[in-house]
Amino acid sequence: MREVQIFDFLKIMKKEYLEKLSNGQVYFSCCAKWRSAAKLYDNKGQGDKNEGVFAKYLRKNSRKPIQNYKKQFGKDLIVRTDGEYVLLSRKSSLYVPATCFYSIDSQSIINELPQNEEERISKIAESTQDNEFRVDNVPLVIPNKFSDDFHWEKDDVEAILIKSPKNFVKKLKDFGMFGNKITYIDMSKEYDIFAEKLYEKHYNLSLEAAKEKHIDIFFKDQKNYEHQYEYRIILPKKALKSAKKGYTIKLHGLKKYVYKKGNKEVAPKDIDFICNTKNLRIKLCLIMEKR
């Protein structure tokens, strides 16, 4: 079975930053900062030393690829060694304004379902002859893997849910953004997203469009980060001056609902943000389809 109708964003941050987001202030950082963060967080959760690496070759196989990409990218090409491998990335891609969200979608919902919920859904599927069926009151389970990444137990850490973020994403498009789910690949061995045309397979882009949209920062390591189901948004025509600089845009016309502990109210359907979801038991309605 597969789920065909659910899509939310989740953001886990310090309360002060989430408050700004709920008021329409969207902050963009960059991959260069996340590379630096890898040193602070032991390359887990909030940092990735391989952000933007579009190709990885054994040293003995790297001469021709390096020559090829030097012709394409010139001084924009960064070449660094990591053990027996050579890693290639673009300096410009590291400073493209970017912001990230956990994507609550079909894959993430089903992967995290408790066993009793899987059994319940199976029984509903067996009891109907329809190919498509509805399942109510499915719990949204926030995986420990990514709540642990952001020190979930601390009092100053909260979560915000962006409900059906079509309106949110539409507003961002006015600023020239490009957004898509991260593609997770095996980075433990040689790979080259341009040579292997992974940009074409996963994003349906031409080579030139892939370069222009800095598609190299939409690929991450399957082994370490696949649990994050990340949706990334970038502003490809802008560039930050340094990893310490950020970029903020203001969105208008978004509505929010603030959940307070002990408040049993149900958030209205036309809300964009549900704030303080760390302690909220959220139930979803899934429309499932039999395979």
Image: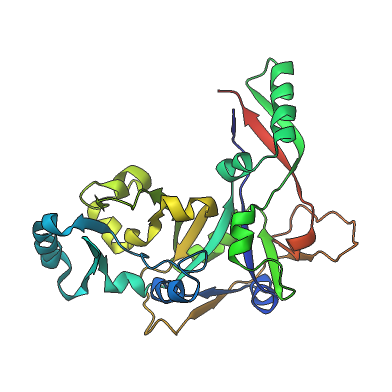
Q: Nearer the viewer, residue 257 or 73?
A: 73
Question: Where is 253 relative to 129, above or below?
Answer: below
Is 58 positioned to the left or the right of 198 in the image?
left
Residue 117 place in picture, x, y as percent? 73, 34
- Residue at 40% in and 54% down: 221
Q: Which corner quadrant holds the C terminus?
A: top right
Is 207 positioned to the left or the right of 232 in the image?
left
Question: Where is 226 relative to 159, above or below?
Answer: above
- Residue at 73% in and 22% down: 123
Is 197 positioned to the left or the right of 135 in the image?
left
Residue 204 place in picture, x, y as percent? 34, 45
Q: Quadrant of residue 51?
A: bottom left
Question: Where is 287 relative to 68, above or below?
Answer: above
- Residue at 88% in and 56% down: 265
Q: Is residue 259 visible?
A: yes
Residue 41 place in picture, x, y as percent? 50, 72
Residue 103 place in picture, x, y as percent? 57, 53
